[in-house]
Amino acid sequence: FMNDEISISASILIICFVAASAREVTAQSRVAKTPACRECVVTLARRATLGGAAAEGPTVFSTVSRNSAGFYFVTPTYRPGTVSVFNASGKYARVIGRPGRGPGEFRLPQRIRVSNRDTIYVMDQSAGHLALFNPDFIYSRAIPIRGPVTDFAIDTNGNVALSGVYVVGYK
């Protein structure tokens, strides 16, 4: 059982992350029982179907991000150590990266985010870094990450906020 100190620490980290990533809604997000805006309506619309039976690449994704040109970036992929790229109509286009431990290589890419400048950020916790690719899909650099990072967000200035669950006070 978690003690109160652990529970409070985890809650604070989750709240900080949700505030930092307003662009993305996950299955873990909570919806208020009473709407703040009674006139507001949320409409879901299909933009693209990625992959599929006749396409290369996976059909179940844990992370999907989109850039301003309409490309979709997804993990996991059918090729370990890579990120699959689909065009705006959902057709498989290419992969980014390759398996390995060097620049532009991945062990297990887990999360993808695209900045407002179309820089592609790929988190590879097992390799201990965020890999950055320019809008032309070319590797540019890595940002080291340490600890149990589970997700991240990017603000409009390119600052990265990491989130994770840290056990505090556990013996």
Image: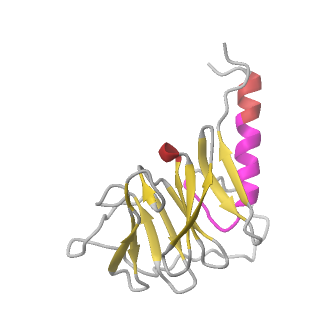
Q: Is residue 31 above or below residue 125?
A: below
Where is residue 157, by image quadrant?
bottom right
Q: Main secondary structure of the magenta part?
A: helix
Please identify the residue farthest to the top as the structure is shown: 171
Q: Is residue 18 within the magenta segment?
A: yes
| Vertical order, 44 against 161 (above or below) | below
Residue at the image point whose x is 60% and y is 73% from the top: 119
Task: Please tell me in which quadrant of the rendered image residue 123 appears.
Answer: bottom right
Q: Quadrant of the N terminus?
A: top right
For this rendering, which residue is in front, 115 or 66? Answer: 115
Q: Would you say 25 lies left or right of 99 here?
A: right
Q: Which residues are magenta?
A: 10-27
Picture coordinates of residue 168 (x, y %)? Answer: 72, 25
State the residue at coordinates (29%, 68%): 57
Left or right, residue 107 beside residue 3: left
Quarter occupied by residue 161: bottom right
* Residue 120: x %, y % from top left: 56, 70
Q: Residue furthest left?
A: 54
